[in-house]
Amino acid sequence: MAIQVTNIMTGWFDVREYKERLTRDQWKIKGEDDNIAFTTTFEAGTPEAAAFAEHGKPYTDGNGNQRVRVNFKIGGRCGWFDEHAQPVAKPANEELDGCRWEVRIVYNSLPKDPAKPKKASGYWANSVQFRKVLDNPFEEMTGAQAVPPVPDTSFKCQQTPPPENPLAGKMPPMDYVTVDELPY
């Protein structure tokens, strides 16, 4: 049972208690000391899916693609680190709920053992490095200065008359060369 580290993965924290016949929004958020999970998916047949084949669960997504769902169980003693690898307190479950996250997880894989409860086997996180994925990367920034509006630079035809020619009517008559006068 060696400690392993994942690559950066995108997924969701599962912080709600499942209740049959209720919608997800009606499920109660777990207590701060309760175990939660991080869930991610991979395309079936990829090296990532093969790496988590022991406890990954295959399924077919809404588009008919074969995928593998992987859950990482997170207990109360798990360490939490921000995107700069600085230790931080575990965020409240309400903050983790309903958002996509990028994570790197240090974990152990506990094999299935008939003598232990089924919940004990799986991938158990020792520490989680996390960063929220912004669905809209242009959310309002706190402390930012207001940017003046961009001026309208679209082409607009001006209906002003052209300037007058200062030599109009003042030019001496031109002495034109005729074709017969050309030397060739």
Image (tube, rainbow, N blue to C red):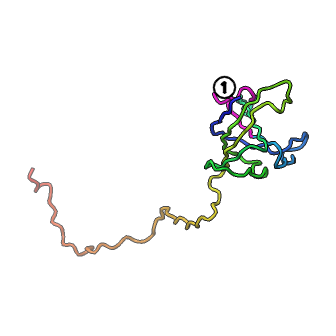
Q: Nearer the viewer, residue 51 or 144?
A: 51
Please report the residue visible at 64 percent of the width from the left and 28 percent of the height from the top. Answer: 46
Q: Residues within 10 Å of mark 1 (few under 14, many from 20)?
A: few
Write down the region rendered in magenta: 38-55
Is there any visible trace of residue 59 in the rendered image?
Answer: no
Residue 57, placed above or below residue 181: above
The quarter of the picture where residue 11 lies is: top right
- Residue 143 vs residue 152: left or right? right
Q: Nearer the viewer, residue 155 or 10?
A: 10
Residue 6, placed above or below residue 156: above
Which residue appears farthest toward the right when viewing the image?
21
Q: Nearer the viewer, residue 11 or 137?
A: 11
- Residue 95 vs residue 167: left or right? right
Whole-percent x, y for residue 96 in the image: 75, 49
Please report the residue visible at 76 percent of the width from the left and 48 percent of the height from the top. Answer: 98
Residue 175, placed above or below residue 9: below
Please report the residue visible at 11 percent of the width from the left and 54 percent of the height from the top. Answer: 182
The quarter of the picture where residue 179 lies is: bottom left
Whole-percent x, y for residue 4 in the image: 66, 33
Which residue appears farthest toward the top when viewing the image?
114
- Residue 39 vs residue 156: left or right? right
Whole-percent x, y for residue 100 in the image: 70, 45
Mark 1 residue element: loop
47 in magenta: yes
Please report the residue visible at 71 percent of the width from the left and 30 percent of the height from the top. Answer: 67
Kind of residue at badge 1? Gly
Which residue appears farthest toward the left when viewing the image?
183
- Residue 26 vs residue 153: left or right? right
Identify the residue under disc 1: 45
48 in magenta: yes
